[in-house]
């Protein structure tokens, strides 16, 4: 019998305590970030899709077309090509495409690169209903940035 | 609980719980044979999100499989990272620097906190309480921000590497973690226990509901909070210690009742224990490198290797068979929730539908991990 009364009085008290807590929280400041009015700043290690890095001196991509990133990618989302112009020692990048639909942002490509040629971008506002929008031509992107 | 389980076959009906149902938290389908409000038979149906992770491992190099591990249990991804990395390190005989081991423990335990907080929020949502979700997500968000600073991602981390971790942690992370623990410590008693644990409605919904005995746990190979809620003290971190766990002083919460409330309390106590581990690890954090020199393409010697870790839902085991090639010959992944779910059918028999859902919530199911 005492359990019965305990349930009624103890239970009612627990509900009132709960209501008190929610009432107090109600007047606390808002903690939700009001996206898109407030835009979050990405941390330096944020992983966006990859992008090419430009050589500060020459203005050309750092990439030497070794193909390590292509081979290390678990999903095969990188396609690159290069050619050796006449009279030059190094290969020059002619094509660098990223199929972002397959990418899982693991960073294997960036870790495998010995020439500091690729990095994570800070783009996160990516939304589209078309698949083609995620086939990035990174070489073109680099040219547009400069 | 007395329930009319035996009834005429033409008086029962079939109810499909899922594959798209908010209470199953993913694409789990449970075929329920019902007699009115009572469950006569419950059959979990799997296979809606099978992605062949084990098969995928066989045609990639060891390092290329890393991102897959995080996609299984997306709520405690770092433990899965850890389990896989441990197995490969055992196979290839790689020594991990001590600082890296500490960083692994800190991040895994932080990730365990997010997992338990999300379980708490989702479980209460299943039971019909909405506002606790917002408080738990507020806290969880703080951890995600901390982990994003070091790992670069918020949910499907790919942070551990063979022989260490991807990046070192900085002072901001350390002070941020200390502040967070202080904050969670102050919020736990009031926002979590006063508001929810002592609430009469929660107690009535969870006490003596979904009893799982020790024998049932043994029969189905259940692990994690489900096993510890049934009175068995088993935690891989204590029983088969790995990494630097033996250096920390922490307890394994055990409750004997075996009902939903016991499992709830085990997880709530684990939150406190995880905070203790993180604090000790931050105090003892040694200096030094965070990554050993490891060849880019690993070729472990032929053999059979196994390592297990304690994930938020139970023990996660990784069995690796190598034949000296650069990719695994076979990788068998033992995920805890698969075993935990298998006893659902037996226990749910004779329960009210609402109680069966409370029981399912207390199992803490993550479907992509059941269906790999």
Image (cartoon, coloured by chain):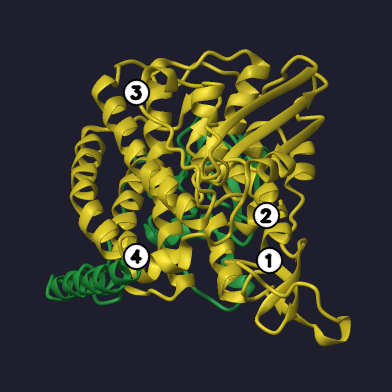
Q: Is residue B266 above or below residue B98?
A: below
Front tag of 4 and 3: 4
Which numbered disc covers residue B341?
Answer: 2
Question: What distance separates the C-alpha of mark 1 from that of mark 2?
Answer: 10 Å
User: Which is more N-terminal, label 2 or label 1?
Assistant: 1
Quadrant position of residue B283: top left
Residue that numbered label 4 is attached to: A3
User: Answer yes or no: do the residues labelled 1 and 2 have beta carbons within 8 Å?
Assistant: yes
User: Which is more N-terminal, label 2 or label 3?
Assistant: 3
Tell me the residue at 39%/67% (across/down): B202
Q: Are marks 4 and 3 on the same chain?
A: no
Residue B255 position, x and y percent, is 46, 42
Residue that numbered label 1 is attached to: B28
Residue B4 position, x and y percent, is 72, 75
Colour green, chain: A
Asked which secondary structure carries label 4, the reply is helix
Instruction: Report the number of numbered marks.
Output: 4
Q: Quadrant of the N terminus of chain B?
A: bottom right
Residue that numbered label 3 is attached to: B249
Dot 4 falls on which chain?
A
Dot 3 falls on which chain?
B
Tell me the residue at 18%/50% (across/down): B186
In the rendered image of the structure, the colour used to display chain B is yellow
Front tag of 1 and 2: 2
Asked which secondary structure carries label 3, the reply is loop
Front tag of 1 and 4: 4
């Amino acid at each position: 019998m005492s359990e019965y009364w305990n349930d009624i009085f103890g239970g009612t008290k627990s509900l009132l305590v709960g209501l008190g807590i929610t009432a107090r929280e109600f007047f606390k400041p808002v903690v939700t970030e009001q996206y898109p009015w407030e835009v979050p700043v990405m941390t330096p290690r944020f992983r966006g899709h990859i992008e090419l890095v430009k050589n500060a001196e020459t203005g050309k991509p750092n990439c030497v077309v070794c193909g390590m990133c292509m081979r290390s990618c678990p999903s095969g989302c990188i396609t690159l090509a290069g050619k050796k112009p006449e009279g030059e020692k190094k290969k020059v990048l002619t094509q660098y495409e990223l199929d972002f639909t397959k990418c899982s942002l693991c960073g294997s490509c960036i870790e495998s690169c010995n020439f500091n040629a690729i990095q994570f971008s800070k783009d996160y506002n990516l939304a589209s209903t078309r698949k083609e929008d995620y086939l990035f031509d990174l070489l073109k992107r680099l040219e547009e940035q400069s | 609980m007395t329930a009319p389980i035996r009834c005429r076959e033409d008086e029962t009906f079939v109810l499909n719980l899922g594959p798209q149902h908010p209470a199953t938290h993913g694409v789990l389908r449970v075929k329920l044979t019902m007699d009115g409000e009572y469950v006569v038979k419950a059959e979990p149906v799997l296979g809606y999100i099978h992605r062949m992770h084990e098969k995928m491992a066989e045609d990639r190099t060891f390092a290329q499989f890393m991102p897959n591990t995080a996609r299984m249990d997306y709520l405690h991804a770092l433990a899965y990272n850890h389990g896989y990395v441990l197995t490969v390190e055992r196979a290839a005989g790689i020594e991990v620097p001590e600082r890296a081991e500490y960083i692994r423990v800190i991040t895994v335990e932080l990730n365990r906190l997010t997992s338990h907080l999300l379980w708490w929020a989702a479980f209460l949502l299943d039971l019909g309480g909405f506002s606790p979700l917002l408080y738990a997500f507020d806290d969880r968000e703080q951890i995600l921000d901390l982990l994003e600073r070091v790992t670069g991602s918020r949910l499907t981390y790919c942070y551990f590497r063979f022989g260490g971790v991807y990046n070192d942690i900085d002072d901001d992370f350390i002070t941020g973690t200390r502040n967070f623990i202080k904050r969670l410590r102050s919020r736990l008693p009031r926002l979590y226990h006063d508001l929810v644990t002592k609430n009469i409605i929660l107690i009535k919904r969870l006490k003596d509901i979904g009893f799982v005995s020790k024998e049932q746990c043994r029969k189905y190979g259940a692990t994690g909070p489900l096993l510890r809620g049934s009175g068995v003290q088993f935690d891989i971190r204590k029983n088969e210690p790995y990494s630097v766990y033996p250096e920390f002083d922490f307890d394994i919460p055990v409750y004997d009742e075996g009902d939903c409330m016991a499992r709830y309390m085990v997880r709530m106590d684990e939150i406190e224990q995880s905070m203790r581990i993180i604090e000790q690890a931050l105090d003892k954090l040694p200096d030094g490198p965070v990554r050993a020199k490891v060849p880019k393409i690993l070729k472990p010697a032929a053999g059979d290797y196994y390592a297990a870790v304690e994930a938020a839902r139970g023990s996660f085991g990784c069995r690796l068979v190598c034949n000296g090639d650069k990719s695994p010959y076979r990788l068998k992944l033992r995920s805890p929730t698969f075993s935990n779910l298998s006893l659902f059918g037996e226990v749910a028999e004779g329960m009210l539908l609402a109680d069966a859902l409370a029981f399912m919530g207390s199992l803490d199911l993550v479907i992509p991990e059941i269906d790999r």
